[in-house]
Amino acid sequence: MSGLGGGDVVGGLRKLAVSFVVPGPAGVAIRDRLKHLTPQDEKVLRAVGEHQGALASRDLRARCADGHDHSTDAWAARKRELTKESSSRIAGAITKATHDQWALARRCQAAYMKTLAAGIRTLRHRLSLPIGEKGTKRAAGGYHSRGEWFRKSRRLAALEDRYSAAVADWQAGRVRVVRGGRRLLNTRHHLAQARLTEDRWRERWEAERWFIAADGESGKRFGNETIRVTPNGEVSIKLPAPLAHLANAPHGRYTLTTRIAFAHRGVEWADRIAADRAVAYRIHLNVDRGRWYLTASWQRPVVKTIPLEAARARGMVGVDTNADHFAAYHLDRHGNPVGGPHRFGFDLSGTAGHRDAQIRHALTRLINWAVRAGVAAIGIEDLDFTTEKTREKHGRRKRFRQLLSGIPTGKLKARLVSMAAEQGLSIVAVDPAYTSLWGAQHWQKPLATPHRTMSRHDAAGIAIGRRALGHPVRRRTAPPPHDRSDRAGHRTVQAGPGARGREGTRPPTTDRPPGGPSPSGKRKREPSASNTVRNAPRTQQWVQDSLMRTG
């Protein structure tokens, strides 16, 4: 899947972007199930979620109405209105969540405009070409018939109208947000296909719109005053003012009968609450399973990423991302492949939970192998399929478009960065241009042996690793312009200046042990010289005759 990114074209080839070290994660989130809740506990949680969810919906509507006219005074006024029906801390959590949701909608709006612009450019290019003109690897050709040309011209007009409307919304500060999710909202019109009843959908819809969350506060008891979790796992909630009559603890609080114990990062969480450092909590209901969950999250101090040269010091693992597997190769710091290719497969079919588990499992195996290899960083492509997912570029190749859309590039980046940081590994992002093409050209055939199968994706992993290390993809540069290499410098880029045997050619095989037999069985040891006088070489015969005369 390499080599599909966009960019400037210089001399017939796209200008490559500079590799960089991806910043590490800035936050942590862990989750545990609230088990054995009593009917009264569930009643209180539902009441709090419905009440605060209604307040959040009203606040989001007010924020969207403000648009670009929003100010700190308007924010303070909204918070004062919410405080009357909840509390100051709950109002602060709701307004902050509203601003985050509005900002996310703006980023999605910008991405939508970028996608429309890419489709419009492709349509205009193809419509400007003669009918039936063939395309190239870098640009699509003309349309096959006049009928198709006419339909695409109408689609161009439709996309231009959508783009104009999106630009007008962007300039006016209008966003369209659905609390609970637009996908779930549209599912209401397709209950049969979703295998849901109206009551079941309604239950899921209401649960998604609830709001039971609170931001942490450093210096407060256990890092949070609204949703408090003690070191022994006791969970208590500060009830809003209209629901204060449901409290079963002093100061308008309700304590759940259940206890929680975070199995993952539990020690780190306990250290934070023991020092009264801020921890944010969120309680939500999984309708399908009928289970309640508590999620704890906190921010990490900003850690400066290591320099690129430090990430390259111990070599690199180059990873080629594909629709069903990661193709990885270990390279030393000079760019030489070490060992054989490694593939880590995953299956992206099925439910979202299954896909997420498959990605995590594949990344876990990849990271563990990189740790065993002793490298300090993993090189991966900075993939962006925005322009590749459009119908205008791959209109007839529907399965290929579905393949591109199915690769979770955003989730993959976030997962890999956070999981690698826990093992002390850095991530180096490289430009994906021509990695598959040049990798297959320079590395697939030389590394293929009867005992090693090299695919195009394995060769792309080498190309990605070499680009992350700062080396060219090809194995050797062009010969020196003079008759002697010491006048213009050594021509190889694979080994350091002091490496032995750097002037020699690469052996045909690389997977046999030192001194071991050839895996192909074709290369054999040269025959030894004969010990008899009749079959001795002329030089040996001359020496023997001389010795006999002198004797």
Image (spheres, rainbow, N blue to C red):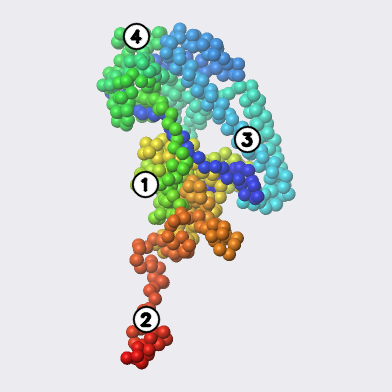
Q: Where is residue 58 in the image (x, y as percent from the top left)?
A: 51, 15
Whole-angstrom CA distance, mark 4 to mark 2, is 101 Å
Is 527 drawn above or below residue 107 in the view shown? below
Say what secondary structure mark 4 lies in.
Answer: loop
Ranked by sequence position, the earlier of labels 4 and 1 is 4
Residue 305 as seen in the image, left or right of residue 530: right
Proximity of marks 2 and 1: CB atoms separated by less than 8 Å = no
Say what secondary structure mark 1 lies in.
Answer: loop
Name the residue carrying label 2: 529
Name the residue carrying label 1: 374
Name the residue carrying label 4: 252
Q: Where is residue 258 in the image (x, y as percent from the top left)?
A: 28, 21
Quarter placement of the C terminus: bottom left
Ranked by sequence position, the earlier of labels 3 and 4 is 3
Residue positioned 37% across, 22% down in the render: 279
Q: Can residue 154 be seen in this view?
A: yes
